[in-house]
Amino acid sequence: MNYFLLIITTFLIFEYVLEIFSKYYNLKYLKANLPKEFNNFYSQKKYASSQEYTKENIKFSIYTSTTNLLIMLSIISLGGFNYLDLFLRNFNIKNDILLGVLYFVIIILFNTILSLPKSYYSIFYIEQKYGFNKSSKSLFILDTIKQIILSLIIVSIIIFLLLTSYEYLETYAWFFCWIFLSIIIVLMPIIYINVIAPFFNKFQKLENGTLKEKIQYYSQKVKFPLQEIYIVDGSKRSSHSNAYFTGFGSNKRIVLFDTLLKNHSDDEIIAIIAHEVGHFKKKHIITNTIISIFSIGTMFYLLDFFIKNKLLFDAFQMDYISNYAGIVFFSILYSPINMVLSIILNAYSRKNEYDADKYSVETIDDKKNLILALKNLSVSNLSNLTPHPFYVFLNYSHPPILKRIEAIQNLK
Ligand SMILES: [Zn+2]
């Protein structure tokens, strides 16, 4: 047997089994009794409903992972990647770069169409049932069309440049691709907030008032150069809430979901903003960017050894060897490394969350505001209060809420 095929299929199954086990443990770990920390925040009835929400999401994700695994294994074993290649070559496209862009476009379209029933069910059945969904079917269709067009444009540009460099630069191609994608990683937050996000949401400046004054007072106190505060209309799709920062140097802006303003007091919002400022002050954002740039560099360096590997192409039953298919196959072969990286990065991110909480506590008037904010956030999002540690280890970028509250309470 082709040992690339052996590595790929073994890992796909291993990853699946690991996921099913962790989800099974997570289901078993749900506690019927409300943790005492949340006594005044949940009625027993609402807590039971939050657990139903968690259960339903886990069961649905087990179902989707199973179908995804079966589809992937069938495509690989039936030579689906080769059929697509032969189909495109039928059109007599002489340019390999164009052929490659089309190859990626079709894979993305296929993926999107495959994931449509999943997102439809998740939004209009699960989220709807627990009162989160605010989206309409027409908005869902419009969103899907916009997402497809945007992702096709972005991916086509990126793939076009990658394939062009592999076609003409040869030995230096990996280096050019690394630099090019690093620039995209650095610019992405700015591109996202200025170009992509406005396609989906309206951003309005926060009106003058006590909240704005409090935020400005806080940012001056901690010497944080805050340029603008925006409110985004997240409530038109979902009642889940969030807040985030974007920007560079002295041009930073904060974006608050309108749902956040509805569910939290001004002091809680300041505590949440202080947590986000903590990520900046402790250089988490810069460190994360540097880590992604280095991991992308390693990936491109390794890609060089596999992009035209005959054995790897045999594993996918390919008739022709090409740079574009090489990139697809390498990304599949690379997934074990990706999984290990994501576990390490999640652990690092959980540590950063404790640090940002600590910063928030040190700079706000009273730590009870941060605790209140976290509790209200997890109640309004019906978060799982008691996830299984193994599930947290694999998937959580944030520590479980009770652990965060405990850490905050232990701070001086
Ligand atoms: Zn955070």
Image (tube, helix red, strand yellow):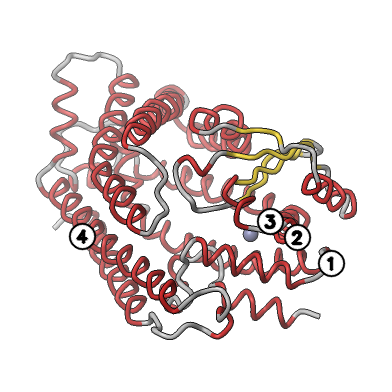
- Residue pointed to by mark 2: 267
Circle 1 sits in a helix, a strand or a loop, which is it?
A: loop
Look at 61% across and 52% down and name the residue there.
262
Mark 2 burial class by Cα count in 10 Å: few <14, some 14-19, many 20+ = many
Image coordinates of residue 225 in percent, x first then y, are 83, 43
Q: Residue furthest left?
A: 78
- Mark nearer the N terminus (4 vs 2): 4
Distance CA(mark 3)–CA(mark 2): 24 Å
Look at 40% across and 83% down and name the residue there.
31
Q: Amino acid at mark 4?
A: Thr
- Mark nearer the N terminus (1 vs 2): 2
Specify whether 401 is left or right of 140: right
161 lies above or below 298: above
Q: Amino acid at mark 2?
A: Asp
Q: Where is the C terminus found, in terms of image quarters?
A: bottom right
Distance CA(mark 4)–CA(mark 1): 49 Å
Mark 3 burial class by Cα count in 10 Å: few <14, some 14-19, many 20+ = some
- Residue pointed to by mark 4: 66
Please state which of the two labelled residues, at mark 3 or mark 4, is closer to the viewer.
4
Image coordinates of residue 63 in percent, x first then y, are 22, 60
Circle 3 sits in a helix, a strand or a loop, which is it?
A: helix
62 lies above or below 136: below
Distance CA(mark 1)–CA(mark 2): 9 Å
- Residue pointed to by mark 3: 284
Look at 57% across and 31% down and name the residue there.
202
Please state which of the two labelled residues, at mark 4 or mark 1, is closer to the viewer.
1
Please state which of the two labelled residues, at mark 1 or mark 2, is closer to the viewer.
2
Specify whether 68 is left or right of 327: left
Nearest to the observer: residue 254 or residue 65 = 254
Image coordinates of residue 53 in percent, x first then y, are 36, 66
Question: Quadrant location of residue 230?
Answer: top right
